[in-house]
Structure formats: C-alpha cells, structure tokens
Amino acid sequence: SNTVVAGYADGTLRVWDIATRTVVREHETRDPVRCMALHPNGTTVAVHTESGAVFEWSATTAKVLRRYTSWFFGPTAYS
C-alpha cells in the first residue's frame, strides 16, 4: 500500500497517499490524538485520544467502527 495514517494534536486523523502527497481520507476526533496503532490487517487503526477515549477507525472508509472508554492514559497496543 502507498498510504500512511497520521494523527494530529488538532484531533484530525488523515490517510495520505504517498505517491501523490495528498490526503485521501480524513476524520475529526473531539480531542488531540495521543497515540495510534495499526492492526495487522492494515486497514483498522486503534486511536487513543487525550481525553482517554479509545476507538477503532477504518482507514479505508474513514468511519469509527467501535468506541471504548479508557481509564488508562498510557500507550495503546493493538492486535
């Protein structure tokens, strides 16, 4: 795949096309993104925000698949 997923302090998630250097998908979260982890399937991303929210996000559709409440503010692992 020629894409990269990036999370930003402004709460935006973006999928970039590396070859064209353009954003191909985007999603706005409510809070700054603290960390992300790519699922081995290569299309789902776990996102942990500054408020403690954790959600699964589809990098192919830019939609939230599942949302969780987190009480832990450390690193996020995903498998």
Image: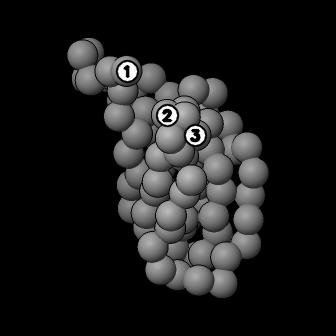
Towards the viewer: 58 or 79: 79
Q: How many C-alpha atoms fall within 10 Å of the one at disc 1: few (<14), some, or many (≥20)?
A: few
Determine whether label 1 and label 2 are within 8 Å by CB: yes
Question: Does residue 1 appear anywhere in the picture?
Answer: yes
* Label 1 element class: loop
Q: Distance between the residues labelled 1 and 3?
A: 14 Å
| Sooner in the amino-acid sequence: mark 1 or mark 2 | 1
Q: Mark 2 points at which residue?
A: 42
Rendering coords of residue 74 (x, y %): 47, 80
Q: Distance between the residues labelled 1 and 2?
A: 9 Å
Residue that appears at 52% across and 81% down: 73
Residue that appears at 61% across and 36% down: 58
Q: Mark 1 points at which residue?
A: 1
In the image, is 16 to the left or to the right of 49?
left
Give the vertical position of 79 relative to 24 (above or below). Answer: below
Rendering coords of residue 60 (x, y %): 57, 26
Towards the viewer: 22 or 5: 5
In the rendered image, which quarter is residue 2 located in? top left
Q: Mark 3 points at which residue?
A: 44
Indicate the amino acid at tag 2. Answer: Gly
